[in-house]
Image (cartoon, rainbow, N blue to C red):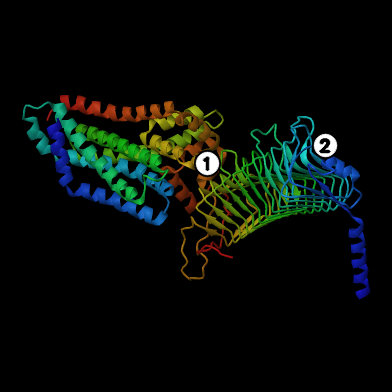
């Protein structure tokens, strides 16, 4: 065992002693990043000193570590893509990359990773960009602690902050993305971890998932995005402890689920969204320990949703708790706390003695004829809601929470 | 007319009901702020109260005052005073004292709570303006009913029915129409339907000013386009003014012809 570790240490030392450090600065013999890369050998380290480097189309085609000291600026002068990584084991750290070119035929990115393994992209600051970090057909990489600040105004001429395409096992952690089209975008990317990111003020979605399975996203904050978060056509996704808030507008959601199966949605907070979660064609999803507060609609179920379970969630002060567009129900609501619950608990066991009906008649009517929303908060609506509560006719008869909790759940 | 207005106004100011009404709003304002700690949330709750209660109290109070002061009115009629100034004076006396109770009752707690530093001040002012309009409208309607019915019971009955119709039944009919014609574009219809009922108009005006408007979806967008512009706002206030002026004109007209 001891021998083995010594052996490993020896190898480590050998490899580091072989690797050289190349310095890049304005007055050094090597004054551009491109020269440095072409002169470097495999596994060398390139240190870029503070300064402004007007370069674009930098291709990293061998395993290198590129480190910026005090955030040197790589200015692409809007001419196209800035850094393209095509080799394995590349680390890029601490650069300030600005002015990526905009094109309607090619997706220029500040930094692109193509068919690479074991890459690390960290501590970058990207500004004035088209696409930010674009990872295609790569795996086992890490995107850590980057700050991406775009200036996107319209959907058609802007790019995404962090984009994954056919890439597996990528970790995306502690990034901050704002003012781009989609903050984080995943397509055909499995087994990724998205953790502790903040995605805000984006034109379209804070996070956009398509055809990506077995991913986990947790402890992220998505706020004030054009349309919130969209998760579509994916299986076995786990969403833990995320915050979705202030996605407010006529077509905004906290989260949009479409064709999602076998997901777990646990411990999330949905606050001040027009629609907390919009669900379409999603089955066998577990919703547990989520907080839905002050949303227009906490949950809007659009049909073809079967065998979902909603347990131990808090529904607090939403205009509508749940909207349903059919009167068939195959989903289970149990042991939730509903702030609109008006029942009583005579045996003092913490569970209300009268079942709660989360679907109001008015939300059913609004689903059918959207224009009727104009009668919101009218006295007549309160009266018909009350009578529907007493004897349901239009809303699903079996859609009820048999064990509504009396007190807000804390966990 | 001013003298009669002054007399009615002071008479009402001395009456217990004005104080009760004032105290009710004062209490409501304080309790709401105490429970909510949030001005804009309190404004929403207040809106619910105002669009139901203000018309009801305006109607009942108007009818009650007319019937109670009937003998005094007859005494006045024997004097060389214009009929229109007698009734208009009385009407304005009632309406203004009610409005004052409303504005002061709600205003005082909110001012103490720091309304002037809050961004909710415009929402709140709109709330008070619509509340005042509703008082003016429903008191005028009440006077109309009372003038047309000698029988007190009948008068009260009609007054309650009027309130019930505008506050509840109208919305029911409106809802049914919207559902019945759901296959057609309904933006214009819902806009007109809202404009025709002062209670609905006030409710929509306030709702659209609050950030709840995004809830209203596409319809909300249409409404916001209309009410959000100064044109829409002017049209709605013209509509509310129309709702005040029409019944008042009828008071003048009716009182001239009426045989006491």
In the rendered structure, the answer to whether residue B65 lies left or right of residue A94 reads left
Q: What kind of element bears circle 2?
A: loop
- Callout count: 2
SS assignment at label 1: helix
Answer with left or right where residue B197 lies relative to residue B90: right
* Location of residue A350 with respect to B20 vertically, above or below: below
- Looking at the picture, how far across and down is residue A45, in whole percent? 85, 52
Where does the N terminus of chain B fall, quadrant-wise? top left
Residue A65 image point, x, y percent: 83, 51
Residue B216, position as x, y percentages in the image: 52, 38
Which of the two residues, A379 or A125, is positioned nearer the viewer here?
A125
Disc nearest the viewer among 2 and 1: 2
Query: Is A201 on the left-hand or right-hand side of A365?
Result: right
The image quadrant of residue B142 is top left
Along the viewing direction, whichever of A17 and A64 lies nearer the viewer = A17
* Residue denoted by label 1: B215
* Any part of residue A60 in sight: no
Q: Which of A302 and B4 is in front in this view?
A: B4
Residue B85 picture location, percent across and down? 15, 28
The dot on residue A57 is 2
Query: In what quadrant of the picture does the C terminus of chain B appear?
Result: top left
Q: Using the rendered image of the protein, determine whether residue A196 is visible from the camera's viewpoint.
A: yes
């Amino acid at each position: 065992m001891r021998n083995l570790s010594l052996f490993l240490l020896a190898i480590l030392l050998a490899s580091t002693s072989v690797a050289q450090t190349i310095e890049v600065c304005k007055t050094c013999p090597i004054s551009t990043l491109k020269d440095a890369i072409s002169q470097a050998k495999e596994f060398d380290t390139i240190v870029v000193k503070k300064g402004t480097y007007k370069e674009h189309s930098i291709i990293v085609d061998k395993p290198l570590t590129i480190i910026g000291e005090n955030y040197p600026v790589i200015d692409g002068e809007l001419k196209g893509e800035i850094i393209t990584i095509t080799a394995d084991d590349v680390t890029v750290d601490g650069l300030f990359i600005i002015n990526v070119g905009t094109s309607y035929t090619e997706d220029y990115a500040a930094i692109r990773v193509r068919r690479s393994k074991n890459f690390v992209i960290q501590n970058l600051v990207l500004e004035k960009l088209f696409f930010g970090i674009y990872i295609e057909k790569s795996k086992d990489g890490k995107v850590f602690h980057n700050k991406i600040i775009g200036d996107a105004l319209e959907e058609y001429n802007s790019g995404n902050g962090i984009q994954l395409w056919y890439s597996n096992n990528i970790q995306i952690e502690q990034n901050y993305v704002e003012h781009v089209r989609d903050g984080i975008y995943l397509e055909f990317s499995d087994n990724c971890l998205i953790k502790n990111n903040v995605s805000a003020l984006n034109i379209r979605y804070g996070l956009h998932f398509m055809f990506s399975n077995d991913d986990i996203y947790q402890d992220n904050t998505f706020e004030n995005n054009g349309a919130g978060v969209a998760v579509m056509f994916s299986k076995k996704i786990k969403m833990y402890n995320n915050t979705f808030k202030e996605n407010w507008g006529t077509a905004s959601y906290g989260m949009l689920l479409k064709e999602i199966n076998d997901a777990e949605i646990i411990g999330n907070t949905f606050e001040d969204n027009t629609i907390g979660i919009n669900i379409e064609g999603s089955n066998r999803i577990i919703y547990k320990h989520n907080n839905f507060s002050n949303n227009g609609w906490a949950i809007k179920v659009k049909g073809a949703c079967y065998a979902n379970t909603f347990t131990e969630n808090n529904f607090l002060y939403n205009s509508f708790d749940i909207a349903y567009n059919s009167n068939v129900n195959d989903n289970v609501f149990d042991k939730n706390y509903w702030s609109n619950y008006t029942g009583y608990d005579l045996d003092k066991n913490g569970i209300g003695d009268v079942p709660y009906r989360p679907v109001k008649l008015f939300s059913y009517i609004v689903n059918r004829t959207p224009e009727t929303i104009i009668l919101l908060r009218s006295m007549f609506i309160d009266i018909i809601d009350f009578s529907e509560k007493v004897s349901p006719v239009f809303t699903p008869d079996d859609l009820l929470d048999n064990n509504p909790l009396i007190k807000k759940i804390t966990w | 007319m001013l003298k009669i207005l002054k007399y009615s106004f002071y008479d009402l100011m001395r009456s217990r009901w004005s104080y009760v009404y004032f105290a009710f709003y004062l209490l409501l304002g304080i309790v709401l702020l105490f429970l909510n700690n949030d001005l804009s949330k309190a404004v929403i709750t207040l809106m619910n109260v105002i669009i139901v209660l203000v018309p009801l109290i305006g109607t009942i109070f108007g009818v009650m005052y007319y019937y109670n002061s009937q003998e005094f009115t007859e005494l006045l009629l024997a004097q060389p005073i214009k009929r229109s100034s007698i009734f208009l004076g009385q009407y304005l006396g009632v309406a203004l004292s009610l409005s004052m109770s409303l504005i002061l009752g709600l205003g005082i707690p909110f001012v103490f709570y720091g309304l002037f530093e809050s961004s909710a001040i415009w929402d709140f002012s709109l709330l008070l303006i619509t509340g005042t309009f509703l008082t003016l409208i429903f008191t005028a309607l009440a006077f109309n009913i009372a003038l047309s019915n000698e029988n007190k019971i009948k008068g009260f009955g009609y007054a309650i029915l009027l309130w019930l119709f505008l506050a509840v039944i109208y919305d029911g009919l409106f809802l049914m129409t919207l559902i019945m014609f759901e296959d057609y574009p309904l933006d214009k219809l819902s806009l007109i339907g809202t404009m025709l009922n002062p209670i609905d108009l006030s409710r929509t005006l306030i709702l659209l000013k609050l950030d709840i408007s995004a809830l209203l979806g596409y319809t909300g967008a249409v409404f916001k386009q209309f009410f959000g512009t100064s044109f829409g706002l002017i049209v709605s206030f013209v509509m509310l003014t129309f709702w005040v002026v029409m019944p008042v004109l009828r008071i003048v007209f009716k009182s001239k012809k009426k045989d006491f």
